[in-house]
Image: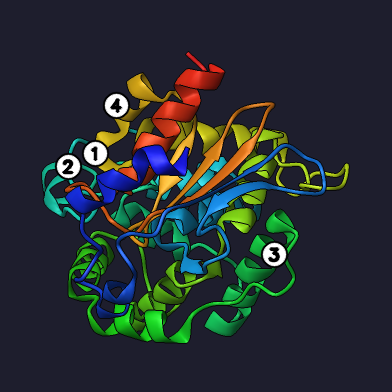
Amino acid sequence: MIKKVKGYTKNGKVADYIPALSKADPNDVGIAIFDGNKTCFSEGEHHKLFTLQSISKVLTLALALMDHGEDVVFSKVGMEPTGDPFNSIAKLESHIPSKPLNPMINAGALAVSSLIKGSSNEEKLERLIQFVRELSGNSLITYNQEVAKSEFETADLNRSLSYFMKQHGVISGDIDVLLDFYTKQCAIEVNCEDLAKIGYSLAQQGEHPQKSYSIIPFEIARLVKTFMVTCGMYNASGEFAIRVGIPAKSGVSGGIVGAVPGGIGIGIYGPALDEKGNSIAGMKLLELLSAKHHLSIF
């Protein structure tokens, strides 16, 4: 199936506004599918490491909900999709109260990240990485320091979003401390197999990918998957729901995680992006998979 979508990579480009991400090979495409057994079905560049980027928003949302509950989290961030780009400030200015519309855009993710419990960034990051390790079954997962540094140094727009929200009482504290955590969160590094197992955990209502216990409570896993359906593919989420119809979340490194409720987990890597920031070959790959195997939840 990789061969069918390889040609689409020439129509995309790697993210270059974060310098460290510009080093990716735009021709790479990889996929892993996990069904709960010991091995993943994999093809293409599935072993290559890449950073979670916005896929981390799904995981910090789950962790923040586990830390504080729905009332606290959704007092800081809304539940509505947006047709604006993921890094837009427009809706913060035009909506009252000035809280982000949802946790899958940058402003919302920053607000959610500010809620993660821990006495220091080191403690917060360790908690998040351990959470990712448990969801994926990979105890070696860590973050890419080069990518984190590159993101922190070019985070002017995210700084602006954060200062705006601080002014309006959505977040508090030192903005650079928040951005240090946020950029390291986005720089957590995985491969397609790791991502497929994370997707499987979400698909199975938060259960461990290879053991019979829950990592994420059922209701939180349901909430997270709902946000993936409505907001997970940036401002292409509506079209994606029609063409593919599974809960998924993308990141500008080219990763996509898919979670078919009660079924499989999917991890995709394809760093050539379309104009909305989604993996152009990855989107097509999911469309073909969904059509062939009737994966749509609709």
Q: Are marks 2 and 4 in contact (CB under 8 Å)?
A: no
User: On residue 84, which mark appears?
Assistant: 2
Q: Which residue is mark 1?
A: 235
Q: Where is residue 167 shown, x and y percent of the image? A: 22, 66
Q: Is residue 78 above or below residue 167?
A: above
User: On residue 133, which mark appears?
Assistant: 3
**Label 1 vs 3, first from the N-terminus:** 3
Q: Residues within 10 Å of mark 4 (few under 14, many from 20)?
A: some
Q: Residue at x 35, y 52 (%)?
A: 108
Query: What's the amino acid at mark 1?
Result: Asn
Q: Residues within 10 Å of mark 3 (few under 14, many from 20)?
A: some
Q: CA distance from mark 2 to mark 4?
A: 12 Å
Classify mark 3: helix, strand or loop: helix
Q: Which residue is mark 4?
A: 238
Q: Nearer the viewer, mark 1 or mark 2?
A: 1
Q: Is residue 40 above or below residue 115?
A: above
The quadrant in which residue 111 appears is: bottom left
**Label 3 vs 4, first from the N-terminus:** 3
**Label 3 vs 2, first from the N-terminus:** 2
Query: What's the amino acid at mark 2?
Result: Asp
Q: Where is residue 100 shown, x and y percent of the image? A: 29, 48
Q: Are marks 1 and 2 in contact (CB under 8 Å)?
A: yes
Q: Is residue 109 shown left or right of residue 135?
A: left
**Label 2 vs 4, first from the N-terminus:** 2
